[in-house]
Amino acid sequence: MKDDNTENLIEWIYNYFENNYFKSEYLIKRAILCTTNRNFDSIYKQILTKLPNETSIFYSTNTPVNEVQAALYPIEFLNEFEVAELPTHE
């Protein structure tokens, strides 16, 4: 989804982001609503590139409860599973 329109939208909503990203009163007055998680992920990654600090990536822990579930639901499948109310694996 990265294009000039998206970049212009981010610049318009988060003007002077590099000088204000650490101020809660600046951030709570701004939002970009997305229709899909895929659109959100794309825009979120673009905004993260504007941060002057190095970013950290955190992963979820997906562990089946028992061996039967482990056979039915491989970890790779669980890591790719996306539910609207839950954050992604990465």
Image: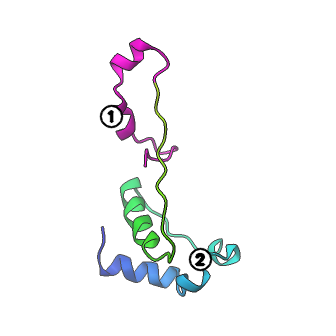
Residue 44 in the image: state x and y as whole percent: 44, 65
Residues drawn in magenta: 64-90
Q: Secondary structure at mark 1?
A: helix
The part of the image, by quadrant, that contains residue 27 is: bottom right
N-terminal-most mark, 1 or 2: 2
Q: Which residue is rendered at x = 31% and y = 81% of the image?
A: 4
Q: Secondary structure at mark 2?
A: loop
Mark 2 is surrounded, within 10 Å at the Cα level, by few (under 14), some (14 to 19) or many (20 or more) other residues, namely some
Image position of 26 (left or right of 50): right
Residue 40 in the image: state x and y as whole percent: 42, 61
Residue 58 in the image: state x and y as whole percent: 49, 50
Residue 21 in the image: state x and y as whole percent: 59, 77
Which numbered disc covers residue 46?
Answer: none
The part of the image, by quadrant, that contains residue 41 is: bottom left
Q: Which residue is mark 2?
A: 21
Q: Amino acid at mark 2?
A: Tyr
Image position of 73 (left or right of 52): left
Q: Which residue is mark 1?
A: 76
Q: Which residue is rendered at x = 46% and y = 69% of the image?
A: 48
| Residue placed most toward the observer, 90 or 55 | 55
The part of the image, by quadrant, that contains residue 78 is: top left
Residue 41, magenta (yes or no): no
Image position of 38 (left or right of 60): left
Q: Quadrant of the N terminus?
A: bottom left
Relative vertical location of residue 4 with respect to residue 49 in this rendering, above or below: below
Q: Amino acid at mark 1?
A: Glu
Residue 65, magenta (yes or no): yes
Q: How many marks are shown on the rendered structure?
A: 2
Q: Residue furthest right?
A: 25
| Residue placed most toward the observer, 42 or 55 | 55
- How far apart are the two marked residues, 1 and 2, measured between alpha carbons? 34 Å
